[in-house]
Amino acid sequence: MTPSVDDKSLPPNHKELMAEAVAEACRGVECGDGGPFGAVIVDNKGNVVAKGHNMVLVTKDPTMHAEMTAIRNACKALGKFDLSGHTLYTSCYPCPMCMGASLWARFDAIYYGATAQQVRLDDIII
Amino acid sequence: MTPSVDDKSLPPNHKELMAEAVAEACRGVECGDGGPFGAVIVDNKGNVVAKGHNMVLVTKDPTMHAEMTAIRNACKALGKFDLSGHTLYTSCYPCPMCMGASLWARFDAIYYGATAQQVRLDDIII
């Protein structure tokens, strides 16, 4: 990942947060919940408020992508639907559904670990 | 709504299904759940398998748009994440998040009652 902003504006644990998003993706695969995608949401001090991984298989719900799961977990934890002041770390560039949800959640920033091409999402439909 | 396909291919209760999506939108507003948006999902015989309305306010979750709620309800009712063979009726043209979710759900068709412009979504952010 190559941050598009000055490193000075990034939280001190920036790299660890992305590593945690990737670790969350691994956890989701290990327990058979869904595809290899993970996400972490942090406040403006870099504190983790929620995590999530792809849960399409276990929930039988096509909307349960990693970013969506993390957004729902964060909103539940914070008791509000407006996540401005927060940042999303996701292991892979969000699909249109998840990017739309991220915009509705009003994140201050989104960082992704890999492009869809890099993870060879050959079966991507949208 | 002006169907883009031959009327002969539409279910016999096509107009009633869209009216039900609009009625679902009204119900959501009346009970204070969220914005004025409703959706209905039907099988290939026109039988309703799930409904949903915007529940952003009551759930404090920005992803709980009408289409998303209906998709989740349908998947729960049918026990599967693949809604091919089904059609979505929604009171308003889906936002990018909901269109993305609808593509992941693999609907055979989507019918919408109004454009975003027609319902004056002046505060739309995406």
Image (cartoon, coloured by chain):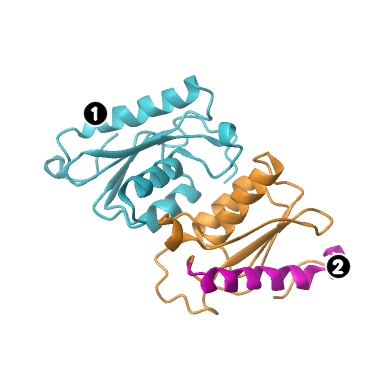
Chain colours: A cyan, B orange
- In the rendered image, residue A61, in percent from the top left (x then y), is placed at 59, 41
For disc 1, the marked residue is: A16
Q: Nearer the viewer, mark 1 or mark 2?
A: 2
User: Between B49 and A115, which is closer to the camera in this rendering?
Assistant: B49
Residue type marked 1: Glu
Q: How many marks?
A: 2
What segment carries the magenta color? B8-32
Specify whether A36 is left or right of A21.
right
- In the rendered image, residue A29, in percent from the top left (x then y), is placed at 49, 23
Q: Main secondary structure of the magenta part?
A: helix
User: Between A86 and B125, which is closer to the camera in this rendering?
Assistant: A86
Residue shown at 49% from the left, 34% from the top:
A54
Whether the magenta-drawn stretch holds residue A48 is answered as no
Which element is circle 1 on?
helix
Q: Residue furthest left?
A: A8
For disc 2, the marked residue is: B12
Residue shown at 39% from the left, 46% from the top:
A71
- In the rendered image, residue A114, in percent from the top left (x then y), is placed at 39, 34
Q: Residue furthest top?
A: A30
User: Between A93 and A118, which is closer to the camera in this rendering?
Assistant: A93
- In the rendered image, residue A23, in percent from the top left (x then y), is placed at 36, 25
- Neighbor class of circle 2 (other Cα within 10 Å; few <14, some 14-19, many 20+) is few
Quadrant where the image shows the N terminus of chain B: bottom right
Quadrant where the image shows the C terminus of chain B: bottom left
Residue shown at 52% from the left, 77% from the top:
B117
Rounded to the nearest angstrom, the CA distance separating label 1 from label 2 is 56 Å
- Above/below status of B109 relative to A118: below
